[in-house]
């Protein structure tokens, strides 16, 4: 069952499971997308089918009508939106909460977790944008040493935002428990990843 949610600056869709397991998963989108991204819709349906309450939601920049995220100095507003979304879901379940997102959404979620220890029990980071395409020197890892929330990274083997080798090297900077799930022949859009929802659930670190 799907139900729209729009309260306290949070806008999204809640997927209610037929047989709840007491836990919840939040999913948000990348820089050029929204909560209706096909990957998020497919994963939300699969996770709800496994018993999770799932919220797929829009980040504040999208709610405000922007077509792209703000400059880095102003992206804290998106992280504040992630905290609000987690708080909203925390009132729906009594169990654990996994917060995640695709690309920019996953990066901001991880940053929010580093800034707010205890925000979530685990992270699901889909296509983490390790660096801009063709710019491997511009790593987005400055906060990794502060990240202690268990995190599962899911990345395509052909993702131009970070090779498998680059990701493995970068994950060594994170003191928290991490795992890396590779989707063979997939790019940054992670086509085909929705079919791996069962494997994702098996590998979740929370």
Image (spheres, rainbow, N blue to C red):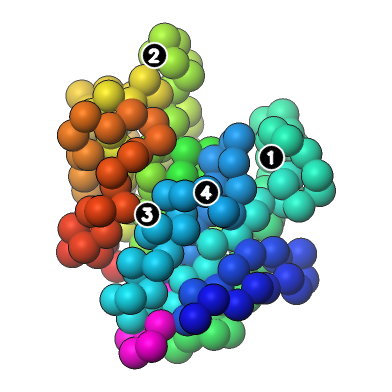
Q: Which mark is residue 124?
A: 3
First in sequence, mark 2 or 4: give its number: 4
Query: Residue 5, position in %: x, y?
Result: 67, 73
As drawn, is 11 to the left or to the right of 101? right
Tell me the residue that label 4 is attached to: 37
Q: Quadrant of the C terminus?
A: bottom left
- For image coordinates 38% across by 59% down, the residue present is 43
- For image coordinates 23% across by 53% down, the residue present is 196
Tell me the residue that label 1 is attached to: 75
Looking at the rendered image, the disc whose residue lies closer to the viewer, 2 or 4, is 4
Query: Residue 126, position in %: x, y?
Result: 38, 45
Element at label 2: loop
Element at label 1: loop
Query: Residue 66, position in %: x, y?
Result: 78, 39
First in sequence, mark 3 or 4: give its number: 4
Tell me the residue that label 2 is attached to: 136
- For image coordinates 49% across by 75% down, the residue present is 15
Confirm whether the magenta stretch covers residue 19. Answer: yes
Confirm whether the magenta stretch covers residue 31. Answer: no
């Amino acid at each position: 069952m799907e139900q729209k949610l729009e309260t306290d600056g949070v806008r999204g869709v809640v997927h209610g499971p037929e047989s709840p397991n007491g836990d919840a998963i939040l999913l948000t989108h990348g820089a050029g997308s929204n909560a209706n991204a096909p990957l998020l819709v497919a994963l939300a349906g699969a996770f709800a089918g496994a018993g999770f309450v799932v919220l797929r939601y829009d980040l504040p920049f999208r709610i405000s009508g922007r077509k792209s995220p703000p400059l880095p100095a102003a992206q804290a507003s998106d992280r504040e939106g992630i905290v609000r979304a987690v708080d909203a879901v925390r009132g729906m379940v009594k169990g654990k909460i996994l917060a995640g997102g695709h690309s920019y959404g996953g990066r901001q979620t991880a940053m929010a977790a580093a800034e707010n220890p205890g925000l979530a029990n685990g992270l699901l980071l889909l296509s983490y944008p390790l660096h801009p395409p063709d710019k491997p020197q511009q790593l987005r890892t400055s906060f990794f040493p502060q990240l202690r929330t268990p995190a599962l990274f899911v990345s395509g083997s052909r993702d131009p935002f970070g090779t498998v080798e680059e990701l493995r090297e970068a994950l060594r900077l994170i003191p928290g428990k991490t795992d890396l799930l590779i989707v063979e022949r997939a790019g940054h859009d992670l086509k085909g990843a929705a079919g791996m929802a069962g494997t994702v659930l098996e590998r979740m670190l929370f």
